[in-house]
Image (spheres, rainbow, N blue to C red):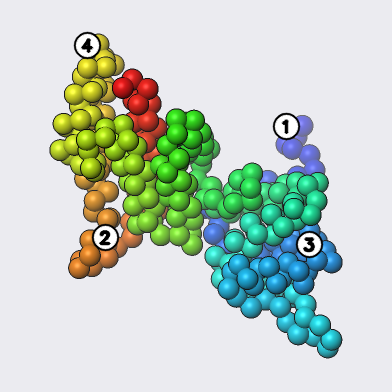
């Protein structure tokens, strides 16, 4: 039985559990600040000045004869600045040395994983919410599919929706962005439609689905998804802020993730329909 237990794994990684992914912690900040310092090395003033310009915060301190970057300050900055620094420092390190950039990527990813955070890194050091493998696979597949079909604006909206699911983001904006992605694809596939709503779905999408599928289970299922899309669009409108009206209360994360996940699927499905028109 003992042979099945992974050898050499730290005790905390094997036996210490937590109820949910962490958005912030003292350990996370300590480990990231040390990784920043190790990766940047002697370029601390140059990188500190770069971060100040990009983030709009003060990081450099005046010593006895020069300015310097105190890495421990990353334990106290706002969460948004900490996560943005992960990206900016990663790009800076890679620009200086590809090998060191790869080490930085691997080590920060390991820190996120071992501290059981709510984050993951993309290949360009962007920080994204780490929800679950199925969600990530769905998003990545949709982004690739939209890009290959030329729906670049919709792809960007999906990525923005994903970013807004971070703890520092706004779940209302996540829903608005994924809605914009679906609407962008819909209007390109059906140029007569000026928006996506129950009327345009019934007048444009439904006839197309009826024509493009032979009678049978596939057609019936596709038509059910036409109706589901109508309900999804109506639900999103509850979070689309109208001028002169009070801003709606942000939905809980679970509901936002559900709506975004469904929107990702609808955007890809509509884009695939463009091949048949």
User: Where is 205 relative to 183, above or below?
Assistant: above
Return the residue nearer the eye: 20 or 240.
240
Of the residues under marks 1 and 3, which one precedes in the sequence?
1
Q: Residue at x 76, y 69 (%)?
A: 46
Of the residues under marks 4 and 2, which one precedes in the sequence?
4
Q: CA distance from mark 3 to mark 2?
A: 43 Å
The C terminus appears in which quarter of the rendering? top left
Circle 4 residue: 215
Circles 3 and 4, Cβ within 8 Å, touching? The answer is: no
Tell me residue 80's x, y (percent): 54, 65
Describe the element under mark 1 as helix, strand or loop: helix
Q: Specify whether 192 is left or right of 149.
A: left
Q: Residue at x 24, y 51 (%)?
A: 237
Circle 2 residue: 241
Of the residues under marks 4 and 1, which one precedes in the sequence?
1
Return the residue nearer the eye: 78 or 155.
155
Of the residues under marks 2 and 1, which one precedes in the sequence?
1
Q: Residue at x 80, y 66 (%)?
A: 43
Furthest residue toward bottom? 64
User: Where is 218 relative to 78, above or below?
Assistant: above
């Amino acid at each position: 039985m003992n042979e099945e237990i992974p050898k050499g794994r730290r005790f905390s990684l094997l036996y210490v559990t937590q109820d949910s992914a962490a958005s912030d912690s003292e350990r996370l900040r300590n480990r990231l600040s040390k990784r920043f310092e190790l990766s940047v090395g002697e370029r601390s003033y140059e990188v500190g000045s770069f971060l100040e310009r990009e983030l709009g915060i003060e990081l450099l301190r005046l010593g006895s004869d020069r300015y310097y970057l105190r890495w421990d300050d990353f334990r106290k900055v706002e969460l948004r600045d900490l996560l943005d620094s992960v990206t900016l420092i990663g790009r800076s390190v890679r620009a200086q040395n590809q090998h060191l950039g790869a080490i930085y990527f691997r080590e920060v990813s390991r820190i996120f994983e071992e501290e059981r955070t709510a984050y993951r890194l993309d290949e360009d050091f962007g920080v994204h919410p780490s929800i679950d493998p199925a969600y990530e696979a769905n998003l990545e597949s949709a982004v690739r599919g939209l890009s290959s079909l030329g729906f670049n604006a919709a792809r960007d909206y999906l990525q923005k929706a994903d970013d807004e699911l971070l703890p520092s983001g706004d779940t209302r904006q996540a829903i608005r962005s994924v809605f914009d992605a679906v609407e962008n694809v819909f209007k390109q596939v059906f140029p007569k439609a000026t928006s996506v709503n129950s009327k345009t779905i019934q007048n444009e999408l439904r006839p197309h689905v009826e024509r493009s599928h032979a009678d049978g289970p596939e057609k019936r299922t596709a038509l059910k998804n036409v109706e589901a899309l109508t309900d999804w669009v109506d639900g999103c409108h509850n979070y689309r802020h109208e001028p002169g009206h009070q801003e709606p209360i942000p939905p809980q994360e679970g509901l936002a993730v559900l709506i975004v996940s469904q929107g990702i699927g609808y955007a890809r499905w509509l884009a695939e329909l463009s091949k048949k028109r």
